[in-house]
Amino acid sequence: MIRVLLADDQTLVRGALAAMLGLEADIEVVAEVGTGDDVLPAARRTKPDVALLDVQMPGKDGIAAAAELRAEMPGCQVVMCTTFGRPGYLSRALAAGAAGFVVKDAPPEQLVDAVRRVNAGLRVVDPSLAAESLATGQSPLTLREREVLAESSDGGTISDIAKSLHLSEGTVRNHLSAAIGKTGARTRAEAARLAEERGWL
Amino acid sequence: MIRVLLADDQTLVRGALAAMLGLEADIEVVAEVGTGDDVLPAARRTKPDVALLDVQMPGKDGIAAAAELRAEMPGCQVVMCTTFGRPGYLSRALAAGAAGFVVKDAPPEQLVDAVRRVNAGLRVVDPSLAAESLATGQSPLTLREREVLAESSDGGTISDIAKSLHLSEGTVRNHLSAAIGKTGARTRAEAARLAEERGWL
DNA sequence: ATCCGACCATGACATTTGTCGTGGGCCCGT
DNA sequence: ACGGGCCCACGACAAATGTCATGGTCGGAT
């Protein structure tokens, strides 16, 4: 029996996944949580073999939860499972110690397959996503540029960003300009959107 | 037996929902599709009692699919099921003839409950969402303001929008300014984001 | 030690954007 | 016929934004 912990913020989806995994003869769902913060406590209690984590969750990020979990329970393998095939997610998830990465577009068998393989000590990554991730490459953005873009992404003005990062307005504009150039965008709004899509956040 | 058609673009989620609904004794999933365009043909073939449609799907919108379906098969009830509780989705879904509206955050029982009630001829709407929808009210944006805002939402410049809508740049700025005022935003990027969230699109 | 490149910061400058006032055309309800 | 609301357009002006040249710091290579 493979003991599985399930973490996804959408209750309905989580329940449905649990029902589906429960149909498999060799899989047992031993815990279900809805936030990143609940992952570690639940894992301590139930000692799962595999943790299936969604990336976006309230509270702690799925990736942060994975890192925590791997640090404390190295015997528990992690499969990340997310809606968006953002290339950046993949690399960060693997860096955090995840052994598998599945997109929610994938056929259902692929998920149970991933759980079994990961439990057997193998790594499993969606091939199309891996290719895209390699093609997109690493972020050409510098640290400051990322920070400034991230602040800009929810529509605040330049002076908002400047205050929030304790910089001069001119400096903020400068970083923004560089980011716009590197992304090939024409406005900082577009630059933020593109960088987000490519995982350059 | 309640015959259910299932439409969701995320294969994994769709399969999981099918597994969950299949566990109920009185429910039978007779069709699964992944795009809005496939809904009507599949419905013709399988004559479902209830159609469970996701809002965002490739090809035809879930809402458009609902309207089509209701027009041709009035006996088939529709439950919309979506990730985001955008108030605008709710009103548009009901206008399209949906009898139920469920958010993916809801507990699993609520979904099977919704299917049963809708099949019995009742309407079922997530109460918290209904309240929010009424509170947010109708869109105060005029037609042009919506168009301009929609074009603006992917980061193009003013002159892009002007060319795309065959308007003067000054006019575009005017509409944008009005939209910014009505949403309470400070930049058009923020205005677009807020309008989107509130279903004012 | 020196140079070089990458990053950060800043101020000047041109352009774009947001705001406001004005005016005209259209359709609808009174 | 008359107002009222919406749409379109223009001009003007202040503010925000994007671009550039410049200079500072730090670490590694020569």
Image: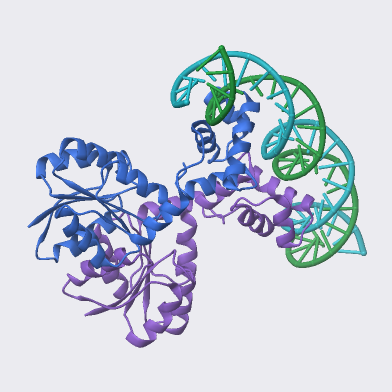
Chain colours: A purple, B blue, C cyan, D green
Q: Is residue B48 left or right of residue B166?
A: left
Which picture quadrant has residue B63?
A: top left
Residue A61 vs C15, above or below: the answer is: below
Which picture quadrant has residue A24?
A: bottom left
Query: Residue most toward the bottom?
Result: A45
- Classify the position of the N terminus of chain B by image quarter: bottom left
* Count of marks placed on residues: 0
In the image, B128 versus B86, the foreground residue is B128
Residue A103 vs A119, above or below: the answer is: above
Residue at 63% over, 32% down: B174
Instruction: Report x, y in % for residue A106.
Output: 30, 55
Residue A6 vs B19, above or below: the answer is: below
Which picture quadrant has residue A22?
A: bottom left
Instruction: Report x, y in % for residue A174.
Output: 74, 48
Instruction: Report x, y in % for residue B30.
Output: 12, 51
- Whether residue B164 is visible, yes or no, is no
Instruction: Report x, y in % for residue B5.
Output: 17, 50
Residue at 53% over, 40% down: B154
Query: Residue most toward the left?
Result: B1
In the image, A182 versus C27, the foreground residue is C27
Residue at 57% over, 46% down: B183
Q: Is residue A80 left or right of residue D24?
A: left
- Whether residue A182 is visible, yes or no, is yes
Residue at 45% over, 44% down: B138
Q: Is residue B122 left or right of residue B141?
A: left
